[in-house]
Amino acid sequence: MLYISDIEKIINNTLNEHNLDIICEFDNNLSAPMSYNVSTNTIKFNYLQVNGYKGKVRIKETEEDFVKIILYRIIGYYLDFKKNKHDLRIIMYGHEEEKEKLKSEIETNAWDYGRTLIPEQLLESYDKVRELDKMLIN
C-alpha cells in the first residue's frame, strides 16, 4: 500500500529531476488518482484513488514506478498546457461535441507528452497502462 508521504516523495523527486516548478498537494476529495490544475500549476493526488487504480491496472512494476507512470501522464497535461493555448472556455460553454473533441485532444496530448519524459525502462508499462486506461473508461 502506498501512503501519502510515499507518493508525495515520488512526485517531488520526479519533478525536481526534471526541473519542473509544479506544486504538489494531497487532496482526499479528488475523484481521480492524480490531476493537474493549470490555473494553480498544481498536481493533486488522492492516495486512496492511487491505490485503487493500482488494483484495477495490474502491471508488474514496483509501487514507485507505478506512481511514476501515473505522474508522467499528469506531467503531460502540464506540458500540453505550456505548449498549446487551448480555449478552455469550450469546456465550460461549448456544445457537447466541441467539449468532447477538446477533452480528447488534451488527453491524447497528455499521454504523448508524458511519454517523451518517462524513463525508457518504463515505456512498455506506460503504453500498457494507457491501453488499460482506455478500456477502463469505456
Image (spheres, grey):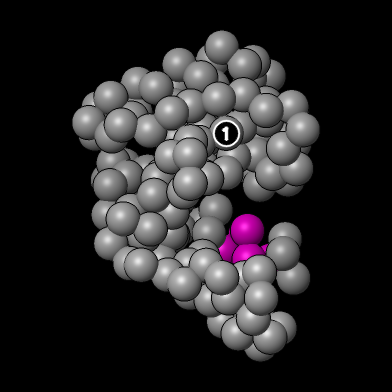
Q: Is residue 44 above or below residue 8?
A: below
Disc 1 marks which residue? 44
Q: Which of these two is toward me, 136 or 91?
A: 91
Note whether residue 59 is visible.
no
* The image quarter in which residue 100 lies: bottom right
Residue at figure coordinates x 39%, y 49% from the top left: 78
Left of 66 or right of it: where is 138? right
The residue lying toward the viewer, choosing from 50 and 34, is: 34
| Left or right side of 101 for 65 | left
The answer to which quarter of the image holds residue 18 is top left
Q: Residue at x 62, y 16 (%)?
A: 4
* 6 part of magenta stretch: no
The quadrant of the image that shows the N terminus is: top right
Total labels: the figure holds 1
> In the rendered structure, which amino acid carries the disc numbered 1?
Lys
Q: Quadrant of the C terminus?
A: bottom right
> Residue 66's spot in the image, x, y percent?
52, 35
Q: Main secondary structure of the magenta part?
A: helix
Magenta part of the protein: which range?
A: 131-135
Q: Picture coordinates of residue 104 (x, y %)?
A: 55, 74
Residue 90, how many percent across, how many down?
58, 75
Count residues near mark 1 (Cα–Cα under 10 Å), then give few for <14, some for 14-19, many for 20+. Answer: many
* Residue in the image at 36% along x and 67% along y: 85
Residue 42 seen in the current view: yes
In the image, residue 100 sits, relative to residue 11, either above or below, namely below
Q: Residue at x 55, y 25 (%)?
A: 25
Q: Tell me residue 95's x, y (percent).
A: 68, 86
Mark 1 residue element:
strand
Q: Indicate the quadrant where residue 77 lies.
A: bottom left
